[in-house]
Amino acid sequence: MTGTDFQNKKDMLDARERANFDITQIRNFIHGGKNDWDAHHSIVQIMSNDPTFDKSLRVYMSRSDRYKRGLKMMNRIIQLRDEYSWSPAQYSKAVGLADEPLPLNLHDIAFQPVFMAQASPELLKRFGKLIESRGIVGCYLQTELGHGSNVAALETTAIFIPETQQFEIHSPTLTSTKWWIGSLGLTSTHGVLQAKLILGGKDLGPHLFLVPLRSLIDHSVLPGITIGDIGPKAMNGYTAVDNGFARFDHPPHAKISYGGMLYIRSSMVTSAGWTIAKAITIAVRYATVRRQGGKDSQGLENQIITYPSVYYRLLPILAHAYVFILLGRNLSLAFSEMSNRLASGDTSLLAEMHATTSGLKVLVTATSTHDIETARRALGGHGFSAYAGIGRIYADNLPSVTYEGDNYLLDQQVVRAAVKAYHAFTNSASSATVQLTPSTNYLRTLVFHTSETSFDWNDSKDVVRLLQTRAAKVVQQYARQSENLDASADQRVSRAVTDAFVAQQVQTFISALSGELPGRESLVLTDLFRLHLLTVAESALVDILSFNLLPTQKDDLKRSGEDPTWILRAEIKSLCLKLLPQAIGLTDAFGFTDWELDSALGVSNGDVYKALWDAVQTEPLNKTHISEGYEEYLKPLLERSQRYAAKL
Amino acid sequence: MTGTDFQNKKDMLDARERANFDITQIRNFIHGGKNDWDAHHSIVQIMSNDPTFDKSLRVYMSRSDRYKRGLKMMNRIIQLRDEYSWSPAQYSKAVGLADEPLPLNLHDIAFQPVFMAQASPELLKRFGKLIESRGIVGCYLQTELGHGSNVAALETTAIFIPETQQFEIHSPTLTSTKWWIGSLGLTSTHGVLQAKLILGGKDLGPHLFLVPLRSLIDHSVLPGITIGDIGPKAMNGYTAVDNGFARFDHPPHAKISYGGMLYIRSSMVTSAGWTIAKAITIAVRYATVRRQGGKDSQGLENQIITYPSVYYRLLPILAHAYVFILLGRNLSLAFSEMSNRLASGDTSLLAEMHATTSGLKVLVTATSTHDIETARRALGGHGFSAYAGIGRIYADNLPSVTYEGDNYLLDQQVVRAAVKAYHAFTNSASSATVQLTPSTNYLRTLVFHTSETSFDWNDSKDVVRLLQTRAAKVVQQYARQSENLDASADQRVSRAVTDAFVAQQVQTFISALSGELPGRESLVLTDLFRLHLLTVAESALVDILSFNLLPTQKDDLKRSGEDPTWILRAEIKSLCLKLLPQAIGLTDAFGFTDWELDSALGVSNGDVYKALWDAVQTEPLNKTHISEGYEEYLKPLLERSQRYAAKL
């Protein structure tokens, strides 16, 4: 063992000792309680000891082999489900722990929920249990080659044939080909399909149909249907998923319902939180043991996490992970309540849920994508190695910014809801009588003012109010300017409104912490949440300055030279320095094993250089001493060039 | 042909007709004149008709096959070089047109230039021609597993042995292993190596050595050296390059010189410009033919490029491509002049070149990475297909933000130079007597003021002055606060200083245009450069507002509601709308062929859906009707689950 290797492990042990709180407490809290952690941990143990879920060679596999490995893992998970009598939640947990999108994922997140919510009682009786058990596996066919978000413009037709009482599904054009459909290319036996319903020659708009796609005997594609895989994805993301295309030539099918589709985006908040958690655990660990640059008090080079440009990038990301995980948990509860009420015909919570989830979907997917890449860059040159593990997380997370509603389209929905709420609020005889929901509560700041002099960056309630005031001002400006909007106005409003909503939620987390955790654990999370609020305020500075909302005391301005934003930046730095000794503890509290992280730079014991060295020994290019291609290409190149040199 | 396919091509033809300028004029201008365009075009013709450079199947290849294909292309380029008597510039052009980093790239950009600049006359005589011809091929061994940018801390040693007058190269620890070295893993016969020179037991710091690595007879690794490939890179970037590691066990070698290394970053500006040009050509073309959402005056869905959220994202990127290409051209000229002066012992231009290239390296790599991803997202869901081509460009461009000096470290160098210049300027008896260089010219605004009321966003000189004033204020603030800096202060200063430098250069481009191009061509580029300046000002709003630099007329403020930044945003929108009809022409003027772009969404004729359809026919997963893995994994999964369903 060399000095540096030993130092790596020592740095990690020292960092763990610096945490001034009980990691177990926060770990259980962030996992939703000790029972949930134990359940999670037992599945991790089962899977990480099963060779089916070994990850060490996947980086070298072709797409075809990755797909096959995906099926193998799914088959094993189904076996384990039966062996251990896993609940649906435990099954989902296992699928998530496979650590990449798998061929059956679209069954779980789209085919089954849409079918269960929309199917007629007869279809439910006939197919419900088979779908629940995965005895048939399905996909959700909406997007076409020529159309995505604009469901009304889909071209696929379903013509009612009175003689047979069936519907003929047809793809009239190349652009009507269903495209991007997850699990369709090679896997699905069935699908739920969106098509224009044509009744007696009349176009009744998009409706849903249950469509058998492949034989249950030999998996061959059924007559009248052409299916294939749509090819590899950018940066090798979603490698094991068979996103597919399908064209229909008048095959007959049953219709499942007349209803529209309910979009479920709430689960994306939780998963964004845990995805960020993985990336930041890798980054904080590596930045703790990587030493570079000037010398510290012991004569060693500084740990890179001690540099302002590093901790200022990483610690807010750590805060995002905690915030999104808790936010997602609340949203899931709210979603369940809304679903229960919907089942009894009560639609009162629907509009609020739509407004909230649209903005949050944009925020968490844009933030997670940005954070993952920021964490990767903080690793320096080694971050570009596939063994670092963050590139893979990025590539699989990347489509989230454009799928399930392109973020720029969702911004428009957030804006529409915000402007509507603004007019309702300002048009009412007394604004105080308008019912404000959590998503519109920021409008309150248009009428209730507090004295500016009482502002304190250390008081999270003040920061939340500032972000609410900023949202209200931006929405007001948008509503007043409606004829003269600039080109990025939608994005500005959407971000301001969502920031205000999240800030308010974070304030409720802070208020609840002392009742949920012991003193030191509660305090460290309070600091983390305050860092979140301050960095959101920093990102909102253009708006805050434009509307003259920046609260500055005269002596602050004196301290800061001429720059009124300096005091906020200085608070952020001081909070970062306070949190720095807790960083390893706060990442350890996510509870990831090395198998889950699959990163040479994120190994728990800090021995990163040994882990990189061990990883390169598995590279197939290193199997031969002279590379393939030398005799055929490199040798003639060198010989030709040597002759050329002789003539120079 | 379906209606939509026809419409795609028509949309593209219509867009071309809307250009009000002669594309040939601007194409020749951006390529450096008609001769340079002709030379470029003839190489494109030769290569695109040669099956060696076919790109259609590379997306399915393993890394091993991509490496082999890389060697094959290099071998063919060397043959073509001899056949057509290509100059070094034409050879470099051909290597660039191979459209991905190749196994010999590090010879060209590091091994050869460092050797030529540093080697002793004897070594130059012995190896110069062989290196120039590629009769031996080399790499540059600096980075170690444990150390990157901090050259002083490298661990590899070179101990002088008086008996043999040679140097023994040795890797004393695991972390001293040379790592990330491009072209080392499988290809290089030689290398230039950085090691600590030990003379009579005394450490004299890093020096350069020429090290033979592999036999010129059979390519076997020489005794005392262990070499291998460091494995795959994130997101499949740099796939064909054999970045490698090497450990040395006391092999003896000759030293090449005592000098340090001169970093060459100027070429990165030009290449960032052309890389952005590719991505934006693909995005503008697809956004022109993709129709989605509301209906236009002909009853067709709108072309997505007509949406503010799309053109506002894309047109500034188009401006960056033009700006960086011209900026890179000037920088290369300046670099040549500096090199010539250096050769005659004149170091007067060195400091300025260092300051300029550090900041520009950060700016162009951060901007290009961000722009490529922004262009990809503007493609919506299809942007995540590998056939879209932008993911590949992103992955190969990505390491530029951390290699050749991590951007966060280079920021510190920019800041150091800026603060030094500030003190020199303010400490001089009369500021007017201080010699300001192009990189420090913005400091002039600290003493010369113009009246605020004369400000006009339409006057590029005013915008440049605003960006200069902002840079001066930010540097001044930094210098005054030196004891109390916040955590992102370096990044803020570096960006402000570099923005001011580039803005000033852009102003010189604008002034020169009318002499270089006819009227309409000159006007359209002037608009594009103005868009660049305005969007840079928008990105600088926090600083501009903080230091109270925003020039606002009272009637502007009235028009804009309460928001003083609205007038700038409105100008940007109006300039975008003016440029929109020219967008296809301005991307056509880059002169890319379909072979160069290799993108189904960027095809020149606009027939994007047919191109996507044709591409998926090449996917190996579509070769069999029933997928591999069905019998072994999917069938048992379904059967087990069907039994399970029966028990539900």
Image (cartoon, coloured by chain):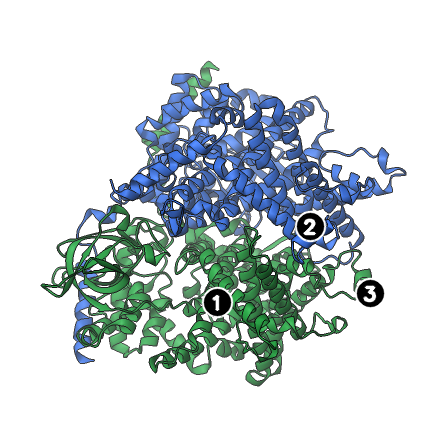
Chain colours: A green, B blue
| Left or right: B319 in relation to A560 | left
Return the residue at label 2. Answer: B556
View extreme (top): residue: A647
Rendered location of residue A504, percent (x, y): 58, 73
Amino acid type, mark 1 = Gly
Sort mark 2 into few (<14), some (14-19) or many (20+) by Cα contacts within 10 Å: some
Quote the CA–CA distance across marks 1 and 3: 39 Å
Q: Chain of mark 3?
A: A
Q: Is residue B613 above or below residue B342?
A: below
Q: Chain of mark 2?
A: B
Q: Chain of mark 1?
A: A
View extreme (bottom): residue: A515
Which badge, 1 or 3, is on the more N-terminal residue?
1
Rendered location of residue A290, percent (x, y): 58, 56
Amino acid type, mark 3 = Asp
| Left or right: B492 in relation to A621 | right
Q: Is residue A74 above or below residue B32?
A: below
Tell me, yes or no, whether the two marked residues, 1 and 3, touch with CB atoms within 8 Å: no
Task: Answer whether residue B153 is visible to the viewer in this image.
Answer: yes
Quote the CA–CA distance across marks 2 and 3: 33 Å
Q: Quadrant of the N terminus of chain B?
A: top left
Rendered location of residue B69, percent (x, y): 34, 35
Nearest to the eye among marks 1 and 2: give it: 2
Helix, strand or loop under label 3: helix
Question: What residue do we see at 37% from left, 27% from top?
Answer: B75
Depth order, front residue of B626/A466: A466
Return the residue at label 1. Answer: A273
Helix, strand or loop under label 1: helix
Sort mark 1 into few (<14), some (14-19) or many (20+) by Cα contacts within 10 Å: many
User: Are marks 1 and 2 in one subunit?
Assistant: no
Return the residue at label 3. Answer: A555
